[in-house]
Amino acid sequence: MAKSNSFTCNACGASFGKWSGRCDACGAWNTIVEETPLSAGPASKSLGARRGAPIRLTDLTTEEAPPPRTNSGISELDRVLGGGLVPSSAILVGGDPGIGKSTLLLQAAARFAQAGLKTIYVSGEEASAQVRMRAQRLGLADAPVQLAAATNLRDILTTLETEKPQLAVIDSIQTMWADNVDSAPGSVSQVRAAAHELTTFAKRRDMSVILVGHVTKDGQIAGPRVVEHMVDTVLYFEGERGHQFRILRAVKNRFGPADEIGVFEMTGAGLAEVLNPSALFLSERGEPSPGSVVFAGVEGTRPLLVEFQALVAPSPHSQPRRSVVGWDGGRLAMILAVLEARCGIPFAGMDVYLNVAGGMKVSEPAADLAVAAALLSAREDKPLPPETVVFGEISLSGALRPVSQTENRLKEAQKLGFTAAIAPSGGKPGGDSGMKLTRMGDLTSFVGEVFGAG
Ligand code: TYD
Ligand code: MG
């Protein structure tokens, strides 16, 4: 008989066939607990033993119009949702504690309520009075949102059943407690059960539900990834603590493009939309300085200019430092290796720091060339030509690969006062943006042309 996995790690959600003191997957101690199967007993062994009820089948053609979406009026949020809130959808909003999830969702709940949706906001973390105080501070005290401070899932579901709201916000899924599951709130089994109950309730009762999920140290929604599979849309709310900018990023969306971002600013009166984020991320620019390069990027459907800053200095350590904020460390190592192997520019014995200004996180490979340019500029202590943006992917051979949406990138750069761009050869024409566009085929010619021979 095949052994079933019936032990689960509370920290990472990995399952095992037997108990052990330390989780092999995440290394945490004393986090492995036994899972109670959905239904026990011999009858559950083989599903074929007893006949189920027939399921009604439909075909793909349907007369029904797509359900109308509701816009909150917070356009940064509506766009990330794929154009407003879809009825009976389930949304998970993840983020570090203190990043502003409760603030965002209280503002969103108020706006959706004002837009005509019957809305209930359930807080498992704060008392109703606290939430009311926050609402007052945000200037939302007169919004028709119903508040509840509760954690018992059974009570919450009963209330939702009688109140029949069109939108429920659950803050947070880690505080919910299902009394039929035998483990502590916040454990994998509890989070999974609560998310399952709430999402199936939402589908059955034509209610949209927004679940708040805390994120663990390594950046995953605490407890199980399984919650991500249960919902239609997964949004991450991210930002650096020291910065006031917050990015709401769609990482999964059944109703719209993934990778879409919305940009907010945390102010004394809650989160404010940032409608022109490029201007914001570049606001501190003056004379071009060595190591600073503006990347013409695209996030989702929208072009976005961000500034890469690099510092390269002789290292006092035998193992030089490689420190990166806002970009992938592995990708940085790759670019350093390509610069060394293909262009003969060594970074051995030097500390390298790379930073994306404003607390933005960039994941596009199109940023490769901007990173290489920042590293070279810092190493040679020579600024790039003024008013210039850079984009392009670098391959391991040192060739520059064209990237998508050249025209969009150029237009955005021009809008913000840039006059020149360096991009890979090939690919789509840049349109008539009026920008001086220099195209290059490989990294070696880039180094030669921009930084002279050495
Ligand atoms: P919060 O929404 O409670 O975070 P989360 O729910 O993700 O844990 O936000 C907490 C932070 O936001 C807190 O440090 C204070 C700050 N804040 C403001 O700066 N302005 C505001 O208007 C509000 C409500 C919060
Ligand atoms: Mg909160």
Image (tube, rainbow, N blue to C red):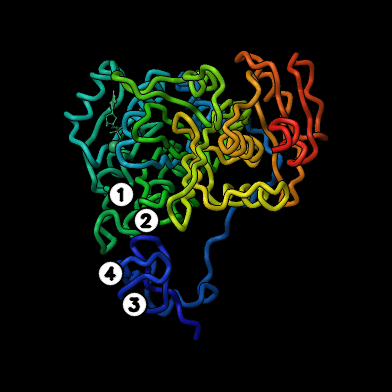
Compare residues 226 and 14 and report the one nearer the observer: 14
Q: Which residue is mark 3?
A: 19
- Disc 2 to disc 1, C-alpha distance: 8 Å
Q: Specify few, some or many for label 2: CA neighbours under 10 Å numbering under 14, 14-19, or 20 or more.
A: many
Q: Position of residue 51 (x, y in %)?
A: 53, 69
Compare residues 403 and 70 and report the one nearer the observer: 403
- Disc 2 to disc 3, C-alpha distance: 18 Å
Earlier residue among tags 2 and 3: 3
Q: Contact, CB < 8 Å: mark 2 with mark 1? A: yes
Earlier residue among tags 2 and 1: 1
Q: Specify few, some or many for label 4: CA neighbours under 10 Å numbering under 14, 14-19, or 20 or more.
A: some
Query: Which mark lies nearer to you, 4 or 1?
Result: 4
Q: Is residue 30 left or right of residue 362?
A: left
- Disc 4 to disc 1, C-alpha distance: 19 Å
Earlier residue among tags 4 and 3: 3
- Disc 4 to disc 2, C-alpha distance: 15 Å
- Disc 4 to disc 3, C-alpha distance: 10 Å
Q: Which residue is mark 4?
A: 30
- The local secondary structure at tag 4 comes to loop
Picture quadrant of ligand 1? top left
Numbered mark located on residue 219 in the image: none
Earlier residue among tags 4 and 2: 4
Tell me if residue 138 comes above or below residue 343 in the rendering: above
Q: Disc 2 beta carbon < 8 A from ligand 2?
A: no
Q: Specify few, some or many for label 3: CA neighbours under 10 Å numbering under 14, 14-19, or 20 or more.
A: some
Q: Which residue is mark 1?
A: 174
Three-letter amino acid code of the residue under disc 3: Trp
Q: Disc 3 beta carbon < 8 A from ligand 1?
A: no
Q: Which residue is mark 2?
A: 223
Q: Position of residue 244 (x, y in %)?
A: 37, 26
